[in-house]
Each structure stands twice: as structure tokens, then as C-alpha cells.
Image (spheres, rainbow, N blue to C red):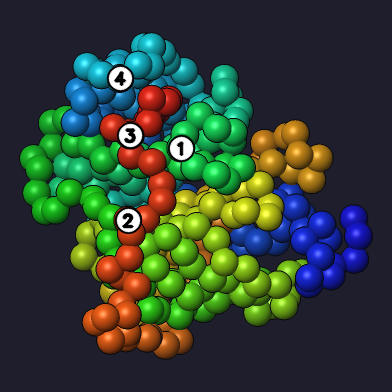
Amino acid sequence: MSALTLSDTSTWLPLDGLAPGFDANKAEPTADLAGRTVALVDERGTRIVHHFGADSVEWEYQPGDGDPIAASSGTDPYEAFEVDTGLYFAQFHHQHKPDEAVSLVIDLTNGRALSIIQAIGDQFPGNTAVRQLFVPSLIEGVETAGAEPAPTTALIGRRVMWVYSSEHAYEHVYLSPQWYSWQCLAGPEKGLADTDENSVWEIRPGIYVFTWREKVIPCASVTIADHRNVRAIRSHGVLFGLDESGTVPTHFTFGAYGRLLSNTVHPDPYDPAAAAPAAGAHAQDAGADTAR
């Protein structure tokens, strides 16, 4: 691998080069979902049943009206993290289709869920190497309460520092519904910075899913973070993309501790929150493989 040159993107670390040690602040996975069956139904009537074991999940996919995907099923290893009481973040990478990975936000208290499917290639709308599909749904057998997961502009204007390990730290500046900027403050990418596509969804008040899709390195990420205490933010996440060869899918989970550094408030006529809707496909917009 070449020596890092800040202005030469061909020398930037590949996804698998970032992985060693990046997960040091990952939370301990929870076994709370083991033995539980979680059935999700979206607005098209598509139904996905998940049978969680100790370390693997069996899923069954039954398409609803207007869903072009054929019925299917499979079993994959998974990890799950507790975000808040009754709120879980589960990750799995399809073995039968290694260019696709799934993140599930499961709110067992409010009976709601958000599935984020990441896919390498062009099966979803977009222009990045890894693209994302967002599918809100209801959980069968759980009384529905609270607001449905939905895109939000709540993070726009904030500058947040994230510490992933004793050696890895970054800052994020949330610019608009479409864009955020990142800068590496410590670690092998120190000094690197860029602006990439992002999407932000509110799950519960103060708890947000933040995703990004990079244009230089073929990768994307899904994270969920509790911002209710801006001096002690906790994040859980997954990175998915291609390794240095550009041919082998790479998937790993991580975690971070964050804190708000500053907040910019724009005058109304110049408020980026009033910009065009954020990128990232929704199920009804994509004739592509949906939540597993």
C-alpha cells in the first residue's frame, strides 16, 4: 500500500485497512433477541419474519402487492446491540448474496422498525459504489405507539467528535439533508477530510440513524446514536463495502463515544434544512431487493 498523501485519493486507506482496532469502542453485543421471533410488515404488505438464535438469524421473505421480489429465505450470522430500553440494532451480512447487508432497528416498545439494506452495485437508485434502501415497518403482535421512523433535519448544523478507539477519532459536520463532512483527528487517516452523502432518520426523540455513502472508498455505513446527552453520545455502527482488491465484500461492526463540539444556526433564508430531500432510496421508490 502506498504512503498516505492527503490530496491523492489513490493512497487513501481501503476499508479493510481501516478495520484493525477501529472497533475497540464497540459495545458488547446483546443476547436479548435470542429465542425471539420478530415479524415486520411494511406499507406494501411485504412480510419478513426473523427467528433469532444465539448467533444466527433465520429469515423468511414474503413479498406484498407491488413488491417485485420473489419469496425467499435464509440463515445468516448476526450481531445485536441494545440502544435504549426495548430498542435494538441488529446486523447481518447475507451469505447467499455477499454484496448485500442488512441493518435492523427494532423498537419492541413502540412496535416499529426500520430496515436499512446496503448493496454493492446499482440495484438501488444512487451514484455511489454502495447504496442504501430504507424501509420503515410495523412489528406484528406489538401495540404501535410513538411516531414512525422518518427522515429528519435535526442534526444539521451540529459538529460532533467521535472516538472509536484510543487511536481513532473523527469529527462530523452535518451540512444538509444530502451532505456531511468528516475529518480524521487521530489515527492512520489523520488529516484526511471529505464531504459525502448522508441520510438521517429519527427513531425516538433524540435517537437517530445516521448513514453515509462514500465516493472515494467503495463503502457505506449505518449507525444509530443516542444524542439525548450531547456531552456523552453513544453510537453503534456497521461498515460495508469492498476490500483493497475491489472484489471482496467487507463487513464489520464498531462503536463510538461522541460529544457535541458546536452548533451552527443559520438565518431562515439560508437554512440548509430547507434544502432538497436527502438521498437514499425508500422501498416504494426502488424495484429492488428489500428488507431481509
Q: Disc 4 marks which amino acid?
A: Asp
User: Residue 73 placed where, x, y %?
Assistant: 42, 15
Q: According to the image, label 1 marks what residue? A: 125
Q: Residues within 10 Å of mark 3 (few under 14, many from 20)?
A: few
| Sequence-earlier tag: 4 or 2 | 4
| Sequence-earlier tag: 3 or 4 | 4
Residue at the image point whose x is 28% and y is 61% from the top: 152
Left or right of 89: which side holds 94? right
Res 143 quadrant in image: top left
Q: CA distance from mark 4 to mark 2?
A: 24 Å
Which residue occupies the foreground of this view, 77 or 278?
Answer: 278
Residue at the image point whose x is 38% and y is 79% from the top: 157
Q: According to the image, label 4 marks what residue? A: 67
Residue at the image point whose x is 32% and y is 56% from the top: 277
Q: According to the image, label 2 marks what residue? A: 277
| Sequence-earlier tag: 1 or 4 | 4
| Residue found farthest to the front | 269
Query: Does the image show residue 83?
Result: no
Say whether marks 1 and 4 touch (CB < 8 Å): no
Q: Disc 3 marks which amino acid?
A: Asp
Which residue occupies the foreground of this view, 142 or 218?
Answer: 218
| Sequence-earlier tag: 2 or 1 | 1
Residue 63 against residue 117 in the figure, above or below:
above
Q: CA distance from mark 3 to mark 1?
A: 8 Å
Say whether marks 3 and 4 touch (CB < 8 Å): no
User: Residue 237 placed where, x, y %?
Assistant: 49, 55
| Residue found farthest to the right | 2
Rendered-image quadrant of the C terminus: top left
Q: According to the image, label 3 marks what residue? A: 285
